[in-house]
Amino acid sequence: MAAKTVHRSTRCETNLFGVRQSVTMHCPHHSALIPSPCFLSKLHLAPIMEGRAWLRRSLRSLLIATLAACCVSGLGCRTIRKIGNNGETLGARRLSRSGMEFMRQGQWDQAEHLFQEALALCKTDDRAHRGLSEAYWKRDQKDAAIKHMETAVKLSEQDPRLVVRLGQMYFDVGRLDDAEAQAKIAFAAQRDMADTWVLSGDCLSARHNRDEALAAYHRALALQPDFVDVKMRVAEIYLSDEQYDRVLATLDRAEDESSFASLPTRVHMLRGIAMKNLGRPELAIKHFAKAKLQSPEMAEPCLQIASIRLSEGDTIAASQEIAEAMQLNEGLVVESGWSKFLLTPEQLAAQKADQDRKLR
């Protein structure tokens, strides 16, 4: 019987994991060209098992990495690094949060007490320094307020919100260079915060760069359209340039967007002044009357109404407004020269009698 001739052939195949490998096939000349199932199982079993093990290891590593990322994002790197399991630090944080809540409610004494207790537990609590700074600022203790805000900025690793607040404090006490420096630091960290643009606009306005200041204020309004304080700053610039139409255009939406109680008195005053200069005295008087209603302690609305009444020749009504202003702020009336238009009781009685005769 003739011996079987065995043929060897080598070919390249790609396994299930995309790896090219050489396969040598041994088969008799009379056998089928397709390898048997038994041969296939022996050929591919090892790489399949190895691939499954690799897949399990990869999925396990991915799951661990995902869980770690979730934990870090939830707690925050700074929180993990600074708080850890320190009970005193956690207690200080709780006191600071309570103090912030009292501060938002306007209960400054309680808030200040809680912030002081928080710092007694942990001197590195940036929230407590921030809150105590605001409490001191409210009490007009500005040096102490700035000191605590500087500490809060350092401890918070230059949180842009605190950097801007520190810049505002510097600006309010006349430290213009320091305020500008804080604005630059805040811009380097975050450029889409409206308060940073407001601080920059304030600094530019103080440097008499009005065009650049207006651009900064408008950028702030683009980021926060309902920023009434910024609208007042823009309106003040337009008023100084005698652009009364723009004053009204800037402030028109402010009255629509805010309730009467929350709208600053200065908005009514600015609109009244613009109306008066545009030759619309009755509308101007309405806005000054709103200012009087909202801030009855102010003498300026009375004097503005008095000026309109004098221009109309109504000396009696003007004198009554001046007399009301005298009761509120006598020094202002005397220094501004309005006291000379104040009628004595005898003059007032005589003019009233004269008016009555004319009406008859």
Image: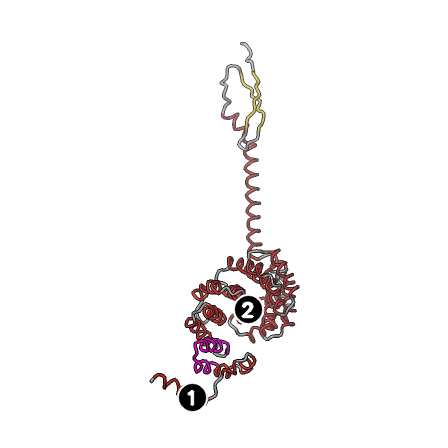
Neighbour tally class for label 1: few under 14, some 14-19, many 20 plus, Cα within 10 Å? few
Residue 309 part of the magenta-drawn span = yes
Query: According to the image, what is the colour scheme of the structure?
Result: secondary structure
Cα gap from disc 1 to disc 2, whole angstroms: 61 Å
Q: Tell me whether the residue at label 1 lies in contact with that at label 2, contact meaning CB atoms closer than 8 angstroms.
A: no
Q: Residue 262 location in percent, x, y? A: 47, 70
Q: Nearer the viewer, residue 342 or 82?
A: 342
Q: Quick one: SS at disc 1? A: helix
Q: Quick one: SS at disc 2? A: helix
Instruction: Name the residue tied to disc 2.
Output: 100
Three-letter residue code for mark 1? Ala
Residue 164: assigned label: none
Task: Indicate the quadrant where residue 331 lies.
Answer: bottom right
Q: Residue 118 location in percent, x, y? A: 61, 70
Q: Residue 75 location in percent, x, y? A: 57, 57
- Please say whether residue 262 is visible from this viewpoint: no
**Span colored in magenta:** 298-321
Q: Nearer the viewer, residue 56 or 77?
A: 77
Neighbour tally class for label 2: few under 14, some 14-19, many 20 plus, Cα within 10 Å? many
- Image quarter (top left, top right, bottom left or bottom right) of the C terminus: bottom left
Task: Indicate the quadrant where residue 240 lies.
Answer: bottom right
Q: Residue 17 location in percent, x, y? A: 55, 33
Spot the residue most to the bottom: 346
Query: Is residue 106 positioned above or below 347 on the image?
Result: above
Residue 350: assigned label: 1
